Image (cartoon, coloured by chain):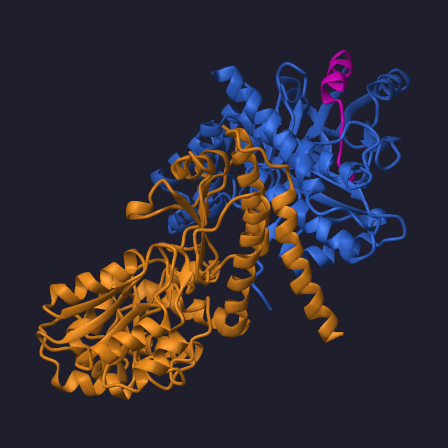
Chain colours: A blue, B orange
Amino acid sequence: MHIRKQRLLTPGPTPLYPGALQAMMASDIHHRTEDFRRVYQAALRDLKEVLGTSHDVLVFCSSGTGAMEAAVSNLFSRGEKVICCSAGKFGERWVEIARAFGLETVVLEAEYGRAVSVERVAEALAAHPDARGVFVQASETSTGVAHDVRGMGEVVARTEAIFVVDAITGIGTMPLDIDGWGLDVVVGGSQKAFMIPPGLSFITLSPKAWQRAETANLPHYYFDLKKEKKNAEKGESSWTPSTALLLALGAALNYIKQIGMDKLIENAQLLARATREAVRELGLELFAQDTPAASVTAVKAPAGWDSGLIVKEFRNRFGAIIANGQGVMRGKIFRIAHLGYFDFADIFAIIAGLEIILNAHGFPVRYGTGVAAAQKVYAEAAFAREAALA
Amino acid sequence: MHIRKQRLLTPGPTPLYPGALQAMMASDIHHRTEDFRRVYQAALRDLKEVLGTSHDVLVFCSSGTGAMEAAVSNLFSRGEKVICCSAGKFGERWVEIARAFGLETVVLEAEYGRAVSVERVAEALAAHPDARGVFVQASETSTGVAHDVRGMGEVVARTEAIFVVDAITGIGTMPLDIDGWGLDVVVGGSQKAFMIPPGLSFITLSPKAWQRAETANLPHYYFDLKKEKKNAEKGESSWTPSTALLLALGAALNYIKQIGMDKLIENAQLLARATREAVRELGLELFAQDTPAASVTAVKAPAGWDSGLIVKEFRNRFGAIIANGQGVMRGKIFRIAHLGYFDFADIFAIIAGLEIILNAHGFPVRYGTGVAAAQKVYAEAAFAREAALA
């Protein structure tokens, strides 16, 4: 056995920002103290700043799914009708949550690898004027496809429905003008572009969303938006907060502010582009038929291959953890992530590894050709920027 | 600014083994307790095991230079004559220490980039039958050149002189049969193939070396081998030990035992070979004219270039810290390390970065060609091993 460093290249959890990891060591702190209130308030303030919104931002001690549930259980009433865009496993999750709480769902399904169009949302809203909400993924992590949430936001804004966006892998990988595009509810998670471990979820709420909270009657207790907001204003969380993760979040948000949210997004977009160019150069096909997401690149395994072989080979040969397809796509695609703490050197290494794996199993590629395609993306972006600065 | 992870590629400090870093968090411990004695004794025992020696192994709270001084100040008497092989900055350090303690030095100098041959050592020993010691670097870190310590050991063993080997970057990068090759004293340091931070030095002593300690009269206090040995037998250090680093060492030694010392060495050798093949493919020249070391590869900057530009570009573009030349070689060479916690993915990424840097400054290379040379080294080694296992 030789040395294989563990390299996390999954679309969550993502590689940890070292400063965040170090900050967690200060978690010998009590959450009902002024010291911790300062940590909590700073995190909420910075979160709002990097999200670029005037809406309220709340944090839960839960995975992202918890904040998805909060959006359903706090903003709707029993039997109400909602439109769910479903283009993959996470779209299906909106449907499952809505149904679990007794909502009537109109499902706009897209074939895996495709997006739900703005037009279909507009048509559905016209056909269902009683729809009280539209649910979508900004970036459908399971297929690596992005939705046009800007276009959808405009359409939904003209109706009574609220627009609920799972941006768990969208935040930090695509521009999201929460206030300007009518994104009434945006859900995020800590283990994504925020570069910290799983365990925190985020939710933003527009005034239109808050109005709903006044009359909504679905049952909820742990995920109570109104209670959480009241407590957040005092620098408190309703229940015991995840102190270690909030310390980590504070450090990560400082880093993100330092880089700039726009640059963090551009970083993911460049790495996604480099990965797409590289895999195409190697003769592989992208899974995304519509706009590919910058959060994660989903690639079809060569014909006749089980993509699990590629996942296994990455782990065994290079200590690199990449994602297989989920659900019915398992064995068909593999996914390489770009959201958060990733850089070009990661991509160069992973593409070099992919070339070796492809060659080793009878899909001949010339060593270095995929890497060269990724290098060209770096060079074009970096040298253009430098020329502009000079 | 985009994301650039810090990547340490210097020949010490080297990248930290994460398990060692985590182990340091338990350093809220007192060093004169049974708990710590167990940590200390286990570290000494495992150190001996991975070094594969029956000789005594001692640990100092110092950098490697401290253990070098200990070898001089504990094993020689004022005015004695010693032979110093000097093929770079660390060879010069042996000369400086010996002179600082009033020893008479016979210096066998090799031009930077070359090694001192076994023949020269044999000749010097014949010309100076009163020489009491021979000093050498197993791997001269400043030039990336290895010495034939096996051949030298055989020659020195036939004399009264003791053979003192600075293996600070040799341990874990080349086979060292301490007992079999007559390596009377071997010096190591923590921040090298041991994958932990700087702050600990190691020294092994043969019976022939211990005999010297009986009559040696040079002054010393902190670095007292006899005192340290007596205390080590009780699981104690003479002075306050570096508890955090000893905890880290324990974790790193467990990892090294798991991998196997032979595989750790092979790992460095493969990565060094991959790097050499890659830089040659790119039209660059190695600095080593004799056997290149596997600890670090020293590469000449292209004609007319200051190697500092390459160092700076690696840092600015890719967050990668590589080493410039030291002393008179500053600006002429750059050095990429392989000792300890490095893997192939590191090399693929660094070579891809090097290609970009060379191109950016008018040394045209085709993207991916150096990476391909490194990939071939991986493929040959990995697939041959797998075929053998099948």
Instruction: Confirm whether the magenta stretch covers residue A157.
Output: yes
Furthest residue in direction top, as rendered: A158
Of residues A240 and B139, the one nearer the viewer is B139
Q: Considering only vertical position in the picture, is B389 above or below A233?
A: below
Q: Quadrant of residue B87?
A: bottom left
Of residues B174 and A45, the one nearer the viewer is B174
Query: Residue B345 appears at what percent x and percent y?
Result: 59, 52
Query: Residue A89 appears at what percent x and percent y?
Result: 79, 42
Residue at x-position 71% and y-position 29%: A138
Instruction: Confirm whether the magenta stretch covers residue B237.
Output: no
Q: Quadrant of residue A337?
A: top right
Residue at x-position 55% and y-position 24%: A383
A302 horizontally vs B196: left or right: right
Q: Which residues, given as a range, are shown in magenta?
A: A142-159
Of residues A147 and A132, the one nearer the viewer is A147
Residue at x-position 44% and y-position 29%: A258
Q: Considering only vertical position in the picture, is A58 above or below A64?
A: above
A215 horizontally vs A79: left or right: left
* Image quadrant where one finds the N terminus of chain A: bottom right
Res B161 visible: yes
A236 horizontally vs A127: left or right: left
Q: Considering only vertical position in the picture, is A145 above or below A353?
A: above
B278 horizontally vs A37: left or right: right
Query: Residue B242 appears at what percent x and percent y?
Result: 27, 65
Res A187 visible: no
Query: Residue B232 appears at what percent x and percent y?
Result: 26, 81
Of residues A161 and A294, the one nearer the viewer is A294
